[in-house]
Amino acid sequence: MIIEKIRQTSRGQEKQDPNKFERDVIKTDIGELKITFIGHGTLMLECGGKAIHIDPRSELADYSRMPRADAIFRPSSIESLITL
């Protein structure tokens, strides 16, 4: 199903509604952690009213319809975190 969504967006069809992405919710001591799978290595994490976008790809989602990012991690910034 995810592969078909990527094919549809690459053909110029409408991007997926942000509320229809696959999402896991994990209860934590500070509230719910929502992990939204957007495609490939692209994720959105939400917790405590904050949103983190990991490797955002505009061909997979319409980010104007998604929560505004408090932080954005791209592959180069993720690599620098791993080496800390």
Image (cartoon, rainbow, N blue to C red):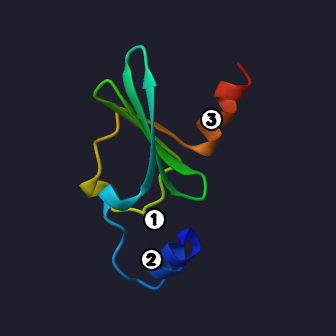
Residue 75 lies, in percent from the top left, at: 62, 44
Mark 3: give few (<14), some (14-19) or many (20+) Cα within 10 Å. few
Residue 82 lies, in percent from the top left, at: 70, 27
Q: Which mark is residue 29?
A: none
Q: Which mark is residue 78?
A: 3
Callout 1–callout 2 Cβ contact below 8 Å: yes
Residue with the most extreme bottom position: 11
Q: Mark 3: which amino acid?
A: Ile
Q: Nearer the viewer, mark 3 or mark 1?
A: 1
Q: Earlier in the sequence, mark 3 or mark 2?
A: 2
Q: CA distance from mark 3 to mark 2?
A: 26 Å
Q: Earlier in the sequence, mark 1 or mark 2?
A: 2
Dot 2 corresponds to which residue? 9
Which residue is depicted at the point 36% across and 68% down? 16
Q: CA distance from mark 1 to mark 2?
A: 7 Å
Q: Mark 1: which amino acid?
A: Leu
Residue 61 lies, in percent from the top left, at: 39, 62
Q: Mark 2: which amino acid?
A: Thr
Dot 1 corresponds to which residue? 60
Q: CA distance from mark 3 to mark 1?
A: 20 Å
Which residue is depicted at the point 42% across and 14% down? 29
- Give whichever of 80, 28 is nearer the camera: 28
Q: Quadrant where the N terminus lies?
A: bottom right
- Give whichever of 78, 46 is nearer the camera: 46
Mark 1: give few (<14), some (14-19) or many (20+) Cα within 10 Å. many
Tag count: 3
Residue 45 lies, in percent from the top left, at: 44, 37
Residue with the most extreme right position: 83
Q: Nearer the viewer, mark 3 or mark 2?
A: 2
